[in-house]
Image: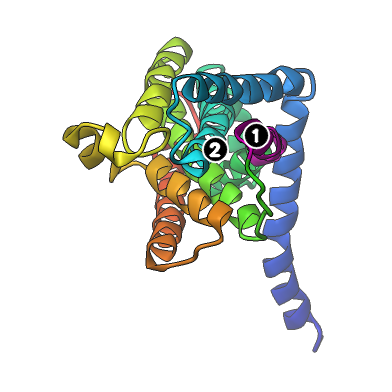
């Protein structure tokens, strides 16, 4: 009898991890037939953008900015689109009805979906760095902070995709909105272009987008310069990730109306 409270406390702490792990494996299983196409898409788009930017001479002055921006592009075309499509599919076709029958907290489902797309996006992000630095003639040594920033950036973008997926009226609308947001996140703020080449309204609106802070933080990582701006970027991404996942869980309805 004396051990029962201890066992109960252990169960309280261990059970959420077991639930998350099961949900995480389910998400990976959902993409076992199509992850190759998603990975190729997440690599071809940033490489194509990188090629055109170098051809136009944009990458000559600030190659690290172009490389970090294309890492974000890779994440945008994998995590944001994929998460939006997944949540929209679950909402439209009643998959959330199934989860409603299980003792599954909404927050863990959101986290599991995001983690699943992180696994799919991390290899393409690493390949973008390796191919990009060769293409731009850079000699970079990746900092361990890179492995911290990529999950934060991936989660912030997938959180936006999750919100679109649960808020859009149907699957087609979610795809359309996500496609528009992809180009907005790429074009507003100094993600692919330096601030001096952007209009004032783009710089202003970019201050509200996680892609701006993720790109800047990755740029600091590639340069190994960790100043106050870097930690501001890091704080923004952490707060944005937490608030976005809580909001998505609150907005998401288990059952269709």
In depth, the one of 257 and 71 nearer the eye is 71
Residue 129 within the magenta-colored segment of the rendering: yes
> Where is residue 55 shown, x and y percent of the image?
50, 19
Mark 1 nearby-residue class (10 Å; few <14, some 14–19, many ≥20):
many
> Where is residue 114 shown, x and y percent of the image?
59, 41
Identify the residue shown where x is 43% and y is 39%. Answer: 61
Start and end of the magenta stretch? 118-137
Identify the residue shown where x is 46% and y is 26%. Answer: 165
**Tag of residue 128:** 1
Q: Residue furthest top?
A: 172
**Circle 2 sits in a helix, a strand or a loop, which is it?**
helix
Q: Residue furthest bottom?
A: 2
Label 2 belongs to which residue? Answer: 67
> Are dots 1 and 2 in contact, CB under 8 Å?
yes
Residue 15 within the magenta-colored segment of the rendering: no
For residue 186, above or below residue 170: below
**Circle 1 sits in a helix, a strand or a loop, which is it?**
helix
């Amino acid at each position: 009898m004396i051990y029962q409270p201890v066992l109960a406390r252990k169960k309280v702490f261990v059970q959420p991890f077991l639930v998350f792990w099961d949900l995480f494996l389910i998400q990976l299983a959902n993409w076992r037939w199509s992850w190759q196409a998603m990975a190729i898409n997440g690599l071809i788009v940033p490489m194509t953008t990188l090629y055109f930017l170098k051809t136009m001479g944009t990458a000559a002055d600030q190659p690290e900015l172009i490389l970090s921006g294309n890492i974000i592009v890779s994440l945008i075309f994998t995590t944001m689109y994929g998460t939006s499509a997944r949540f929209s599919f679950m909402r439209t076709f009643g998959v959330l009805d199934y989860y409603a029958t299980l003792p599954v907290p909404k927050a863990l489902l959101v986290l599991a979906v995001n983690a699943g797309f992180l696994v799919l996006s991390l290899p393409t992000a690493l390949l973008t760095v390796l191919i990009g630095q060769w293409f731009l003639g850079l000699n970079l040594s990746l900092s361990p902070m890179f492995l911290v920033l990529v999950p934060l950036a991936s989660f912030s973008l997938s959180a936006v995709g999750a919100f679109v997926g649960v808020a859009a009226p149907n699957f087609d609308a979610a795809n359309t909105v996500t496609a528009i947001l992809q180009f907005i996140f790429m074009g507003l703020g100094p993600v692919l272009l330096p601030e001096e080449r952007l209009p004032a309204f783009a710089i202003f609106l970019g201050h509200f987008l996680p892609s701006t802070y993720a790109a800047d933080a990755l740029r600091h990582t590639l340069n190994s310069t960790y100043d106050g701006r870097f930690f501001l970027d890091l704080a923004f991404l952490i707060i944005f990730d937490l608030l976005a996942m809580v909001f998505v869980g609150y907005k998401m309805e288990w059952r269709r109306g």
